[in-house]
Amino acid sequence: MNAPTYNFAYLDEQTKRMIRRAILKAIAIPGYQVPFASREMPMPYGWGTGGVQVTAAILGPDDVLKVIDQGSDDTTNAISIRKFFGKTAGVATTTSTTDATVIQTRHRIPEASLHAGQVLVYQVPIPEPLRFLEPRETETRRMHALAEYGLMHVKLYEDIARFGHIATAYAYPVKVNARYLMDPSPTPKFDNPKMDNCAALQLFGAGREKRIYAIPPYTTVVSLDFEDHPFTRYRFDAPCALCGADNSYLDEIVTDDKGGRMFVCSDTDFCEQRQAAGHHGTESAAPHKEKAHV
Amino acid sequence: MSELSSLDNDQPLLVAEGLAKNYGRLPACRDVSFALYPGEVLAIVGESGSGKSTLLQLLSAQLAPSAGRVSYRMRDGVLRDLAELGEAERRFLFRTDWGFVHQDPAQGLRMGVSAGANVGERLMAVGWNHYGRIRDTASTWLDRVEIDVGRIDDAPKTYSGGMRQRLQIARNLVTEPRLVFMDEPTGGLDVSVQARLLDLMRNLVSELGLAAIVVTHDLAVARLLSHRVMVMKGGRVIETGLTDQVLDDPREPYTQLLVSSILPP
């Protein structure tokens, strides 16, 4: 049986060219959603087809790729995408945030600060921040064109009226370069301040919705809020159980069926680096021995 | 009345000249000209299919006329042709200086979001960014349209028909518009609710010195609300004049028919 041969990074050159043009346009108009002819990818929608196409279009032979899913390098989605590009492009892969030149991410921004020359590629399910308030695409496009964003505040108003505070915890709407309203993909709002004035280029790909948008390096990104209800970050009020970090975004892990739980860094690379540097939490990272229930 | 005190009121707020609209070969509206002055309430009456709703859409720049033009005096006092306004300007006008009350409140309200947000939406659209102030203003307006302020966080889909219509009015008036378009504002409401709504609208219009264009097939609405009446038939204005004069002493046979078709109380 012949092994299938792929073009470099799976997509054909004409497709990559088309995607690069969309990316260039997106960078030229920060926050604006550029339509592109999204291709079928060998994975289902919702698994990062948009991000994968953007990554395929920008990847070069010298790039070092890191893929994270909810901050983690070792989940199914992250591993399969990393292996996909390892196989089809033969690029080096890494789990280190600082060593990577291209980082494809789902739902998190790494804790380690990004540096110039890096590209962060987001997988986006629904690119339109106004979609759940205004179902018509023609109307939302017009609202973007005329910068009519009062409706987004209606959503935040509803949050405060119902819960007493802005309860939107992820996909928290931002304004890019004081012009376009943008959905930062379902990252926790904890990560929103990292997008502002970031040294790395941030690209967003939505495969099913066929949109690409971008935040060029050193662009202002402001989270929407009210004067009397300002934007706040949110994290669980606990140190990481493994590395003891008290400033990282935490995942809650249920450990038994008796209410036991622990909080650990969602960014596995960050957590491992800290443990290697000698930081400790209350738990050890080595897996516990299986205990038989009596 | 308050509008007599201002000098600006000598000049018309809205001017229609030779307005016409054809749907293919069908003329829906033919050669309509009039001027509306600040603080004046004009009723457009006629039976179904007489072109009154088309005319309202032409006047509020939601439809492009086949012939003629509509001009509006902006807040800076300059009379401008609506067709020459950019889309951004037109939409801004629609959100601030104008109101549009739909017959079906579901068209004019966001049924899924709370009443407070419905009223506050226009304020947020013009850049209000203080939750407390938006909420206070919304409460004030709910109170003015006789909605219990305790229901500010309920969605209009939980409201009765009359409350929805009053909420729609509050939502439109919150930016203090100078001109309100109303399309059958009391349609589909029962008689006692209609009476209460008309009473409320009459008070608000006179308190705020609003100009209004009210499309209705109900002559009682025209009589209660409007200063002037235009009677339409087959897309033309066949009779126009002061409300009492037209309704008490109709000149055209069609108007006589309309007036005489009201059941005596």
Image (spheres, grey):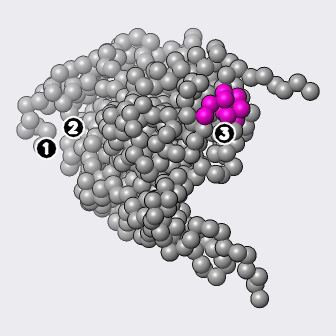
- The residue that label 3 is drawn on is A81
Residue A247 placement, left or right of B176: right
Disc number lying in front (1 or 2): 2
- The residue that label 1 is drawn on is B1
Labels 2 and 3 within one chain = no
- The residue that label 2 is drawn on is B39
Chain letter of mark 3 equals: A
Q: What amino acid is found at the position of numbered circle 1 in the picture? A: Met
Q: What amino acid is found at the position of numbered circle 3 in the picture? A: Ile
Bin the neighbour count of mark 1 within 10 Å (Cα to Cα): few under 14, some 14-19, many 20 and up. few
Span of residues in magenta = A84-92
Disc number lying in front (2 or 3): 3
**Residue B190, above or below B53:** below
Expressed as whole percent of the image width and height from the top left, the position of residue A48 reads 63, 39
Task: Looking at the picture, tell me which residue is in the foreground, A193 or B4.
Answer: A193
Real-space CA distance between mark 2 and mark 3, rounded to the nearest whole angstrom: 66 Å
Q: Is residue A53 magenta?
A: no
Chain letter of mark 2 equals: B
